[in-house]
Image (cartoon, grey):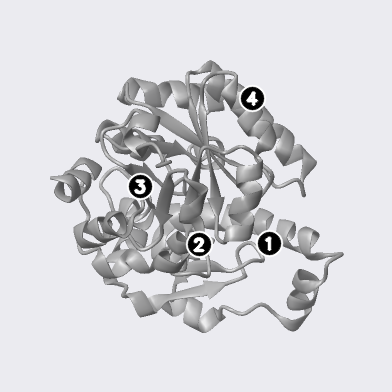
Amino acid sequence: MSEPLITDLLKIRHPIIGGAMYPCSNPELVAAVSAAGGMGMVQPISLTFVNKYDFRKGLQYIRTLTPNPIGLNLLIEKSSQKYLEKNKEWLEIALEEGVRFFITALGNPDWVVRRVAKEGGIVFHDVTTRDWAKKAMDGGVNGLICVNSRAGGHAGEENPQDLLRDLKGFNVPLVCAGGIGDRESYKAALALGYGGVQIGTRFIASTECSAHTDYKTAILSAEEDDIILTKKITGVPVAVINTGYMKARGAETSPIAKFFLDNQKTKHWARMFYTIRSVWQLKQSSGKGGDYREFYQAGKSVSGIKSIQPVAEIISSWVK
């Protein structure tokens, strides 16, 4: 049995999902992706902490910018009970405001699937390997976001071809996440057999994204070899641009930090410490630019990104 088309399943014109990015997913960017025929994704901490919206009012504001469907990203790892409860609150508000598409990550999505299914909604889950995909499928998800080694942020370890080979037997829509920065890479992902793509880095370098000009310029200037991994943001490898600041600071954690990050009893607490600290740092780097000299998350798609354009122009140039 073949999987359903993503465009039919999500009620969108083009098989393009905007990656939910902290701190770069401002409401105008989310709305622009949906208005252009893709699926704009809300990142709740970006909406509430970075852009200072009450969550419900932020969703309502986005709806004033486009009538097209939008989605919500939920990080559902259970290491923080308080944050898990916040996710449940955001989920309920989103459903009340008419959101029917959700992408989950890091935890067991079964409870999200059960709740969303009651409203006729759809849940996809971020995965990097077949083992994680199997767990997500056991949780009842409707599709998989296949995060490969070319992605920005928390990248996977497999290339797009191998990951597709590992996952296509599940017979659900598969979305290529990582390495899509121009028309050629977009077409290549679909030609491989992916049902759609998820775009992050390319949309940072867009007119609607509120990221600082220095961040966007760093993306335009970077090549594939300039993307490195560091554990200094969340305690697990994150893909960033190897700026002069990163070269001076170094991407590796200290021996003491490495011990706590690798130890089974302390790794969750250590990751939480890095994440909480980085939430503030990343907010500052996005808004203040190069003078703050912090982390610029990006994927290897930078090699195909040569200009800052409106989202509608980016998408139309790919799908025409």
Q: Position of residue 203 (x, y in %)?
A: 32, 50
Label 3 and label 1: CA atoms lie apart by 35 Å
Q: Say if residue 304 shows up in the picture.
A: yes
Residue underneath mark 2: 166
Vertical comparison of 86 with 61: above or below: below
| Earlier residue among tags 1 and 2 | 2
Local crowd at mark 2 within 10 Å, few (<14), some, or many (≥20)?
A: some
Q: Position of residue 248 (x, y in %)?
A: 51, 83
Q: CA distance from mark 2 to mark 4?
A: 29 Å
Between the residue at mark 4 and the residue at mark 1, the CA separation in whole angstroms equals: 31 Å
Tell me where residue 62 sits by quadrant.
Answer: top left
Q: Is residue 284 at least partly visible in the picture?
A: no
Report the disc number at residue 274: 1
Q: Residue at x 57, y 39 (%)?
A: 141
Amino acid identity at mark 3? Gly
Disc 4 marks which residue?
A: 115
Kind of residue at badge 2: Asp
List the single residue furthest toward the front: 1
Q: Nearer the viewer, mark 2 or mark 4?
A: 2
Looking at the rendering, which quadrant does residue 125 occupy? top right
Q: Earlier in the sequence, mark 4 or mark 3?
A: 4
Q: Mark 1: which secondary structure?
A: helix
Q: Residue at x 27, y 31 (%)?
A: 35
Q: Where residue 87 sits in the image (x, y, percent)?
A: 65, 34
The residue furthest left is: 320
**Which residue is identified by label 3?**
195
Query: Looking at the image, is mark 3 or mark 2 nearer the viewer?
Result: 2
Q: Front-most of 220 and 6?
A: 6
Residues tagged 3 and 1 counted as in contact (Cβ below 8 A): no
Indicate which disc, 3 or 2, sits on the residue closer to the N terminus. 2
- In what element is the residue under mark 2? helix
